[in-house]
């Protein structure tokens, strides 16, 4: 325990370091400058601003801004990058709430209730609760990394392909809960998402699947590209459709209070706590832990809610839980990087790149060898989250005012920003065309009451599920029992089975009741 | 000819003359504007890091900024295809590697470019040695035991790799073909997840570039049997070479080099090559490359011609190995 305080002390020491600046024009006078705090602030600010552009999620933002940190000293560079990372995370949820355009996997579920809240004139409280939830999750996750970083590493190592596959099965069963309306349609969407995720190269043989000899499809469909089309473009088409404009006018007229009410806070608090818990654990998992965290938090909230029908119609808990979860996960995903030196996801891989550029190759000894770097970064996360809260709460008013811009001016801007965003992720023009095509698909789906969220979840879970299933079976030489003989995997499978029974039972009972009703007549 | 026509004609002539002049002047003054360097992998990856270190110094020599554009996809072949079609004026270059400019030939039958026919070699940047790695509790203690063990337990061992066509995949196929074994290859998405599986003991062995492995080996989470180069690497002085450890046939090194689209003027190539050579002689650049475990090419290996020969040899080396697997 004492160690943790010494270490955190060291970390905060690094963050609050002052550098004497002696500019010539002051004639030898020197001003102390808190360089690292400034870098953290700049990172958070720039990250928020770029992340807020529709279509540019965290990975794209970090990748784009990575080169600007190359000229800085290593600690400063990483503090700034971390700032950019969670800044972008905040920014991403802003577009989800305001214009229904999730920039990345983590904010898809935020769009479900966030955008509905915005439609009801409650964009302010939605944005504010997202910021508050993220701040809380960020604080908890920082403490968690400091206290339990090393032991939690074991979770990352305990999760092999079999465990991951079982977790995905559980996720898939949870996915049905995402649906607002027809369960059958939700299942259809999940399956469609799974199918779309199969486009690209086979992981084991490299053979091309469903790519129709189009070289650009060789790596599969990008998640951001699809999300942009299905949510963003489809939403724009729908808005331009007859009736859409009046809908928007309604939004503009209704804008009420900017801050959450006491009731909102009371409802959100337990959701934030649960979201933080789930996110912290799932974030440590290698692969796509952080992505699944927000989906899991949302479905969990909906499952335990007394009145689940409110979800999808502007329920504040549906914003609070996933936003806390994805922020907690974003932060705990630093654990494998800091303790093992292994990046658990694409953003962390970029962090490794940044470290190598600065001559630090992260590994299991990075904590002992570079304590100022590691602890400075951990302490800066807390400072960064506080800054984001301070930056973002006053910004809520400005964002909400954006909603009052007439839609005829707003939509061309959104389309242009989306196109720039999609293009800049891979520097690929084809991605923009694919997003456009999926905009049409998305419009058709909306018109026929199919929801795009389960589809996107299928897209996220699909590759993880397939790849881990195949890895697990390759390692076990085709023996399916691995999923039940490995304890962690067996537990996950058991939960999945129990959930399935619980979901199916009420339907069965209803059928039986109907039978009885009929026979009585 | 009226006034209008005359002025138009003379204007046209002036433009023509101007164009002729400027193109001549351009060749002498190259570069007069920013240069785009396509890196076919994500920012922060091994190739990207090497490209950034060297081009950072080259930009000073050339007096123009070199802007790195990361274009990812299909094992780097998407970006390489794009570079092969770029204007051959020396303002668009690519940092290719063993995968994009050699192994891609047998791996992708429908490759839209050919490393030799569509590119001018400019210069080698750095080589990255390949290591034979295993989980820390894998029974064999050294490379000799490893060879015996893998041969005896061919049906039981699992070899991880970072995806079809990755350096770890291609080099491990070479190792397996030399040993005459066909273990189960477990594919991962990139070296990070593959290394995670090796550290966690979910897979038995893999071949990987030195950059990712050094901290893990020093931390004792995995072990290294040998480095597949002629000399030991300064960052791992205790790891023997494959020749020392009894497998001289396994020589593999991932390399990164700059290429220009075919037809780029020879004087432009010469200028770029001179800038690379100067960067590779710079103390700061050398120090950073050595920290990564990279091997800096000897002066004789830095010429465009040497790179051309290397590409030819590498294609000849990988084609039979990878054709046999696919």
Image (tube, helix red, strand yellow):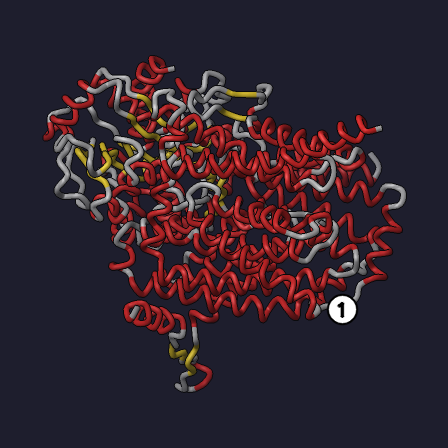
- Screen quadrant of the C terminus of chain A: top right
Callout 1: chain: A
Location of residue A478 with respect to A249 vertically, above or below: above
Residue A443 coordinates in the image, percent (x, y): 77, 36
Residue B98 coordinates in the image, percent (x, y): 35, 29
Question: Can I make out residue B267 in this image?
Answer: no
Residue B275 coordinates in the image, percent (x, y): 35, 44
Q: Residue at x 73, y 60 (%)?
A: A123
Q: Which residue is mark 1?
A: A257
Residue B25 coordinates in the image, percent (x, y): 51, 42
Q: Residue at x 28, y 54 (%)?
A: B284
Answer with left or right where residue A326 lies relative to residue A150.
right
Answer with left or right where residue A271 lies relative to residue B171.
right
Foreground residue among A460 and A421 = A460
Mark 1: few/some/many CA within 10 Å (<14, 14-19, 20+): few
Foreground residue among A213 and B120 = A213
């Amino acid at each position: 325990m004492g160690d943790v305080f010494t270490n955190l002390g060291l970390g905060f020491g690094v963050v609050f370091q002052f550098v004497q600046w002696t500019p010539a024009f002051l004639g030898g006078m020197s001003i102390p400058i808190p360089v690292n705090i400034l870098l953290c602030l700049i990172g958070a600010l720039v990250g928020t601003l770029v992340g807020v552009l529709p279509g540019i999620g965290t990975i794209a933002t970090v990748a784009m801004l990575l080169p600007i940190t190359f000229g800085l000293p290593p600690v400063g560079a990483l503090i700034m990058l971390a700032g950019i990372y969670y800044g972008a995370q905040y920014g991403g949820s802003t577009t989800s709430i305001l214009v229904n355009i999730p920039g990345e996997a983590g904010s898809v579920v935020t769009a479900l209730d966030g955008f509905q809240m915005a439609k009801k004139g409650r964009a302010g409280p939605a944005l504010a609760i997202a910021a508050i939830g993220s701040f809380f999750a960020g604080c908890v996750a920082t403490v968690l990394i400091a206290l339990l970083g090393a032991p939690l590493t074991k979770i990352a190592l305990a999760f092999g392909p079999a465990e991951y596959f079982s977790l995905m099965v559980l996720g898939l069963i949870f996915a049905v809960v995402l649906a607002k309306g027809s369960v059958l349609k939700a299942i259809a969407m999940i399956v469609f998402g799974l199918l779309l995720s199969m486009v690209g190269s086979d992981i084991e043989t490299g053979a091309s699947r469903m790519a129709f000899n189009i070289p650009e499809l060789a790596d599969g469909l990008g998640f951001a590209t699809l999300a942009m089309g299905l949510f963003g473009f489809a939403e724009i088409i729908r808005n331009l459709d007859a009736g859409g404009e009046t809908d928007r006018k309604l939004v503009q007229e209704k804008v009420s209070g900017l801050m959450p009410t006491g009731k909102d806070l009371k409802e959100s608090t337990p959701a934030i706590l649960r979201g933080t818990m789930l996110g912290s654990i799932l974030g440590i998992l290698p692969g796509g832990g952080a992505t699944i965290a927000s989906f899991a938090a949302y479905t969990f909230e909906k499952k335990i809610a007394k009145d689940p029908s409110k979800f999808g119609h502007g329920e504040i808990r549906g914003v609070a839980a996933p936003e806390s979860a994805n922020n907690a996960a974003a932060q705990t995903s630093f654990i494998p990087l800091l303790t093992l030196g292994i990046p658990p996801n694409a953003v962390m891989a970029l962090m490794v790149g940044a470290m190598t550029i600065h001559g630090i190759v992260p590994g299991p000894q990075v904590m002992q060898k570079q304590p100022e770097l590691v602890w400075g970064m951990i302490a800066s996360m807390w400072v960064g989250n506080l800054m984001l809260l301070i930056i973002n709460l006053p910004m809520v008013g400005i964002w909400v005012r954006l909603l009052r811009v007439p839609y005829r001016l707003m939509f061309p801007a959104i389309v242009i920003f989306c196109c720039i965003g999609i293009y800049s992720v891979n520097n690929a023009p084809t991605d923009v065309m694919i997003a456009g095509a999926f905009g049409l698909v998305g419009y058709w789906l909306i018109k026929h009451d199919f929801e795009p969220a389960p589809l996107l979840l299928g897209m996220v879970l699909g590759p993880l599920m397939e790849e881990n299933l195949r890895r697990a079976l390759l390692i076990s030489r085709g023996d399916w029992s691995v999923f039940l003989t490995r304890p962690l995997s067996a537990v996950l499978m058991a939960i999945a089975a129990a959930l399935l029974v619980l979901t199916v039972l009420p339907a069965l009972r209803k059928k039986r009741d109907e039978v009885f009703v009929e026979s009585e007549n | 000819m009226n006034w209008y026509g005359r002025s138009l004609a003379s204007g046209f002539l002036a433009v023509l003359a101007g164009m002729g002049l400027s193109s001549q002047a351009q060749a002498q003054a190259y570069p007069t504007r920013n240069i785009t360097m396509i890196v076919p992998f994500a920012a922060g990856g091994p190739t990207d890091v090497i490209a950034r270190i060297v081009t950072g110094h080259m930009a000073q020599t050339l007096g123009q900024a070199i802007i790195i554009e990361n274009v990812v996809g299909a094992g780097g072949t998407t970006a390489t295809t794009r570079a092969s079609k770029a204007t051959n004026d020396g303002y668009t270059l690519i940092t290719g590697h063993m995968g994009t400019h050699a192994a891609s030939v047998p791996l992708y039958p429908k490759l839209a470019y050919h490393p030799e026919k569509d590119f001018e070699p400019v210069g080698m940047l750095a080589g990255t040695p390949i290591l034979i790695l295993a989980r820390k509790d894998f029974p064999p203690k050294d490379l000799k035991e490893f060879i015996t063990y893998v041969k005896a337990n061919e049906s039981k061992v699992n070899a991880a790799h970072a995806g079809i066509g990755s350096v770890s995949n291609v080099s491990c196929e070479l190792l397996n073909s030399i040993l005459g074994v066909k273990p189960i290859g477990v594919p991962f998405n990139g070296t990070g997840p593959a290394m995670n599986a090796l550290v966690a003991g979910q897979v038995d062995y893999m071949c990987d570039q030195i950059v990712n492995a050094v901290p893990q080996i020093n931390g004792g989470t995995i072990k290294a049997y040998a480095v597949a180069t002629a000399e030991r690497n300064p960052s791992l002085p205790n790891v023997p070479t494959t020749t020392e450890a009894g497998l001289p046939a396994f020589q593999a090194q991932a390399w990164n080099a700059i290429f220009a689209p075919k037809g780029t003027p020879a004087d432009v190539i010469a200028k770029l090559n001179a800038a690379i050579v100067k960067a590779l002689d710079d103390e700061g650049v050398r120090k950073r490359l050595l920290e990564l475990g990279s091997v800096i090419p000897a002066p004789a290996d830095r010429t465009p011609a040497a790179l051309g020969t290397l590409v030819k040899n590498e294609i000849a080396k990988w084609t039979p190995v990878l054709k046999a697997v696919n």
